[in-house]
Amino acid sequence: MGKEKKLVVPHALFPWQPGKEGNKAEKRFIVAYGPHWHDGGKISTKNYNIVVAALPAVLMGISQYGAPALGVIALSMACAMVWEFVMNVVMGRSVSIGDGSAMVTGLLFGMLLPATAPWWVVLLGTFAAIVIGKQIFGGIGFNPLNPPLLALAMLVISFDGIFDFNEALLNYDLDFAMTYPLANLKAFGTAGIGEFGLGALFMGKQAGAIGSTFGLGLTIGGIYLLLRGYIRWEISLSFLAGIFITALLFNMADSAKYAGPAFHLVTGYTLIAAFFLIPEDSSSPVNFIPMLIFGVLAGVMTVLIRNIGAYVDGIPFSILLLNLANPLLDKIRPKAIGKVVENA
């Protein structure tokens, strides 16, 4: 006769176990996959809260760049919802526009674009985000890659001139230097960023995408999402820590060529990525240690691409690379409670 294996769990945690003396036959411990109960939360509620959290940064971008910025944001959100509706119909699924997922995808993608982005770029980008990035994989909750970043990466590779913020925003005359800080750093080293103050950069006084320059607004929105429990602090803070440490090491090695960590934290797509992109549920880990590794490695890759890579900002590529590694990272998980014993 072979030996039978069974899982024994601590009696203090689960008092009703089969085989214990005194247990009634009709009471058994049943194991089932989670979730075990519904806490009353809704997907739509989370998505509407993300929109609210993004509003300060969006409103600042619209106030700086005017009607063109508003047009890009509105068109991006509308196109995303249309593409989602079309895919619902084509694939025979129930209409999912009401959950707010497509709206958030369109909003975040619009925030990553310059105010001068042509309509066809918005159309192509939302197609890539919704159809290729999400619906083909099964819809919300099934996408292995972050949809707005996937669309951004595809467009940057295909039409890099549109994302040259120095050229795109040339006609804007605002009360600060209308040059892209990361592009200046790439071209001239730290000598090219002397005109930028860290406080001014954090307050949005820099050229860039519509919703990625106002660091204070993005930070307030991120803290709001953290306090409401809609994003995990482990991913956001480890991502920022990875950027900080890597930039610090580069700066210590050559301060004339590589900017300090504070500069990297308040420029480019850093803060919108930390609070609105990298913590996205479907494309990020769910366990504690993997979340820390995920965030730190994405931060390290971001600075490596910015400092020695071919692209001015490494955010979209670094996060997408870690999205691909996410299933492997999530295999690092806590040990199950209980022990396996053998019975003759």
Image (spheres, rainbow, N blue to C red):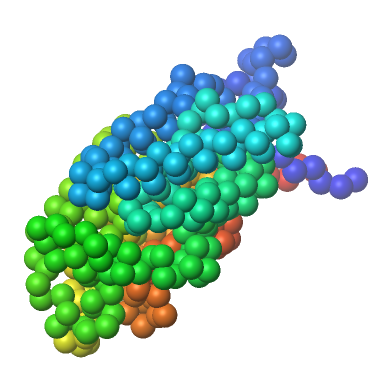
Q: Which residue is drawn at the image coordinates 20% and 44% (left, top)?
A: 63
Q: Find residue 199 and report its horizontal and vertical position in percent.
A: 9, 58
Which residue ends up furthest to the right in the rendered image? 1
Q: Is residue 98 left or right of residue 48?
A: right
- Residue 269 versus residue 191 in the image, above or below: above
Image quarter hosting the N terminus: top right
* Picture quadrant of residue 238: bottom left
* Picture quadrant of residue 217: top left
- Residue 333 versus residue 314 in the image, above or below: above
Q: Which residue is drawn at the image coordinates 23% and 78% (left, top)?
A: 185
* Picture quadrant of residue 114: bottom left
Which residue ends up furthest to the front in the rendered image? 171
Q: Is residue 311 left or right of residue 61?
A: right
Q: Which residue is drawn at the image coordinates 63% and 27% (left, top)?
A: 95
**Looking at the image, can residue 273 be seen?**
no
Q: Which residue is drawn at the image coordinates 58% and 49% (left, top)?
A: 127
Q: Find residue 168 and report its horizontal and vertical position in percent.
A: 32, 64
Image quarter hosting the C terminus: top right
Asked whether 238 or 122 is in front, the reply is 122
Q: Find residue 56 and report its horizontal and vertical position in percent.
A: 23, 40
**Looking at the image, can residue 172 be seen?**
yes
Q: Find residue 179 and report its horizontal and vertical position in percent.
A: 21, 69
